[in-house]
Amino acid sequence: MEKLLIVDDDKGIQKQLKWSLSNFKCVFADNREQAISALRMHEANVVLLDLGLPPDPANASEGLKALEQILSLSPFTKVIVITGNDDHQVALAAIAKGAYDFYQKPLDADVINIIVKRAFNIALIERENREIRELAGVDSGIIGASDAMDKLRTLIKRIAPTEITTLLLGESGTGKEVVANAIHQQSNRTKKPFIAINCASIPETLLESELFGFEKGAYTGAHKTTKGKIEMAQGGTLFLDEIGDMPFNLQAKLLRFLQERVIERIGGRQEISVDVRVVCATNQNLLEMVEQKAFREDLYYRICEMILPILPLRDREYDMVILAQYFLLQYGKDYNVSVKGFSDSAVSALKAYKWPGNIRELQNKVKSAVIMASGSLIDDVDLGLVWAQSQQAENLDFNLRVIRENAETRAIEKAYAIAEGNMSKTAELLGITRPTLYNLVDKHGLQSIHAEK
């Protein structure tokens, strides 16, 4: 039973409230000192407070002092003040000081039960929200309790106040734009615009004008001078998503902007100085694209002053459950449904599924589950994961040669990273000779290691 603290010196009112609120464990206090002591001991989430307390029961001064003390000690406690019939101004004063609600005497059991139950529900929802925010980093926008997300939040805090150009690497749907926005929000540019542009979603013929803008008459249809996204981000942050899809001939113009911080609009001859922070992102292997002459090497080294890898959801421990709970709270409010959480089968399915679509897929699954759920808990059927997991199982590769090759590749790459690129140390960690290591590198086509040989 929820603990309800009742502060009232009238024994008759205490008995009446105890009888009326039999669904709650009532704790009583006769004055302000007892109320504060009981609050510390029982940590009640809801308090019923009569403003007319001794030593001045005829006025509300002592009750208002008690209110202030309660909220100072426990700011999230819901305090419902009880007033007389003619105490409207006093009730409003209590609300202004932070009281959740007020109730006018005489007591009505049905009404007081509704008010108290609603207060407990609000307190519960707010507590869950706070726990999720504290645990999962909702305030920073980087939600998750895994070590990888903790490290990512730490890196963001370190680089955000700087002007270092950052490259975000991660699969589609891992939240690269969210990370870019978090960098902006924790930077010194937070009061200036955050402008995002997806280089893959805009046709090549339009991307240059979208980025750099154009002068009036620059081409047919250019009826007025128009600023590009770079200019629009003046003083703020420019996020270039999927930069690996930027046309090769446009990369040179972008490189000049990054180096000189000046641009020229299409059809213009005047250089325009622009002060922006640049964050880029891609789901492609830019080093391979550099080797294939599909991405400029000088541009690559210009945008990767700092690289932040963003792990896929399947590699983030239990973050999928935390994110699912966050989306559940969000969509529960949006669609006004009473779904409270996930069943054990749903939690197991959330953790077992590989999430090829990452956070975007999880968000869509939870949204549809909130709408389709028939009970207070979402199960794996509501999430649509029963069918998805069966499909996933059918697509598993049981070829032992492929499994062995994949395992060897991962082991070599991990050992190489731990050895900081030293081939002798890499071979030693793997328990093989250098010639064997070189043969395996050639066999598996490990391009990043080839470059160091």
Image: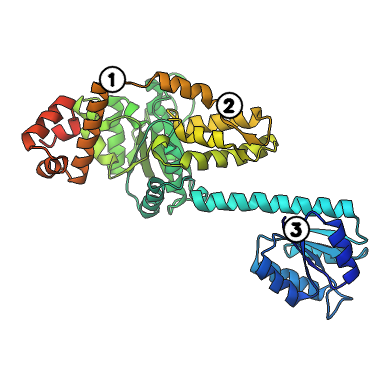
Q: Is residue 212 visible?
A: no
Q: Please tell me which of labels 1 and 3 falls first in the chain.
A: 3
Q: Gap in Å between the C-alphas at discs 1 and 3?
A: 63 Å
Q: Amino acid at mark 2?
A: Val
Question: Can you identify the residue that label 3 sits on?
Answer: 100
User: What residue is shown at x 57% (from left), y 38% (from top)?
Assistant: 327
Left or right, residue 426 beside residue 43: left
* Callout 1 crowding tier (Cα within 10 Å): few <14, some 14–19, many ≥20: few
3 vs 2, front mark: 2
User: Which label sits on residue 399?
Assistant: 1
- Depth check: give the residue in front, 354 or 179: 354
Q: Amino acid at mark 3?
A: Tyr
Q: Quadrant of residue 99?
A: bottom right
Q: Is residue 194 visible?
A: yes
- Expressed as whole percent of the image width and height from the top left, the position of residue 82 reads 84, 64
Q: How many marks?
A: 3
- Expressed as whole percent of the image width and height from the top left, the position of residue 265 reads 38, 32
